[in-house]
């Protein structure tokens, strides 16, 4: 709790710290683009951690499930760095609206990146970003920036996970989800209560939007074809 207080004072954004080796960082999405790299710097300097989960304050997270998955991943002993979330490789560069990128000149699309509703980075990836912060170009969207910054690294596993409902709007409710974005406070309270009582996330599973399994063997423009039946 003391840590949390100190953290609040230092960066002045809504922040939630969770025990064990996971730090859960919740920033309001409006401030995330401008705050996130320095947040990562603060976290890197002040806390011991193995993984960092970045999410927004309208993201509902089943933390124990994230931790369990991280344990499993670590026990596989791959010794690779982890970049885990719901990836997109064919996102069109936004030229208007709050997330517009006026000086993205690299290609027609962004580079593959994990969508900002929630993603996990292993320690060394955060360290890499922090150590190079002064020479990295910061784009308007923090999630797009992270995808770009981590693009040239070797020995990194980009783990696309359909259990991350982390797009700009929720795909609905699936009991497979371990993170779900764009939730109101009331939604979160209800979900929490229902989860506590029943062990399931959704009172009724619904799909408002099809999903995809990322195909890493084809060019990014063909990576992400939405299909029915995927959470
Ligand atoms: C990826 O695309 C290739 C070529 O279309 C296809 O053969 C393969 O089954 C796909 N893999 C997955 C995991 O969808």
Image (tube, rainbow, N blue to C red):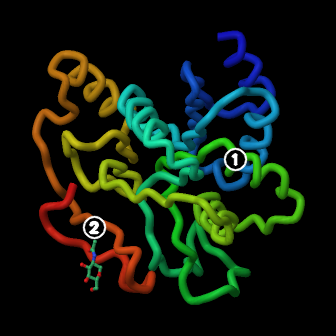
User: Which residue does the image show at 83% across and 56% down from the upper left?
Assistant: 133
Gap between marks 2 and 1 measured at Cα? 28 Å
Label 2: how many Cα within 10 Å (few below 14, some 14–19, many 20+) = many
Q: Is residue 140 at least partly visible in the picture?
A: no
Report the residue at 72% width, 43% height from top: 40
Mark 2–mark 1 CB contact (< 8 Å): no
Up-down relation of residue 231 to residue 87 (above or below):
above
Name the one closer to the observer, 84 or 35.
84
Badge count: 2
- Residue 104, position as x, y percentages in the image: 68, 81
Please say if 172 is above or below 43: below
- Residue 110, by quadrant, is bottom right
Quadrant including the C terminus? bottom left
Q: Quadrant of residue 88?
A: bottom left
Query: Where residue 217 appears, x then y in whole percent?
Result: 39, 79
Q: Position of residue 163 (x, y in %)?
A: 31, 48
The residue to which callout 2 is attached is 212
Kindly give the residue lying farthest to the right in the view shown: 134
Q: Mark 2: which secondary structure? A: loop
Question: To which residue does mark 1 refer?
Answer: 124
Furthest residue in direction front, as rendered: 77
For ligand 1, which image quadrant applies? bottom left
């Amino acid at each position: 709790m003391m840590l949390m207080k100190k953290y609040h004072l230092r960066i002045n954004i809504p922040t939630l710290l969770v025990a064990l080796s996971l730090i859960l960082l919740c920033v309001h999405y409006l401030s995330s683009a401008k705050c996130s790299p320095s947040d990562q710097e603060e976290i890197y300097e002040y806390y011991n951690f193995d993984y960092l989960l970045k999410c927004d304050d309208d993201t509902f997270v089943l933390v124990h499930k994230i931790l369990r998955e991280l344990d499993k991943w670590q026990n596989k002993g791959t010794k690779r760095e982890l970049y885990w979330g719901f990836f997109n490789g064919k996102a069109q560069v936004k030229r208007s609206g709050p997330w517009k990128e006026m000086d993205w000149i690299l290609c027609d699309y962004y580079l593959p990146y994990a969508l900002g509703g929630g993603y996990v980075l292993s320690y060394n990836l955060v360290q890499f970003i922090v150590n190079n912060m002064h020479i990295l170009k910061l784009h308007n969207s923090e999630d797009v920036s992270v995808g770009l910054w981590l693009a040239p690294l070797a020995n990194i596993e980009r783990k696309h996970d359909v259990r991350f409902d982390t797009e700009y709007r929720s795909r609905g409710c699936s009991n497979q989800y371990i993170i779900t974005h764009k939730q109101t406070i009331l939604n979160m309270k209800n979900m929490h209560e229902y989860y506590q009582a029943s062990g399931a996330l959704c009172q009724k599973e619904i799909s408002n939007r099809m999903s995809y399994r990322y195909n890493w063997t084809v060019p990014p423009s063909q990576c992400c074809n939405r299909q029915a039946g995927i959470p």
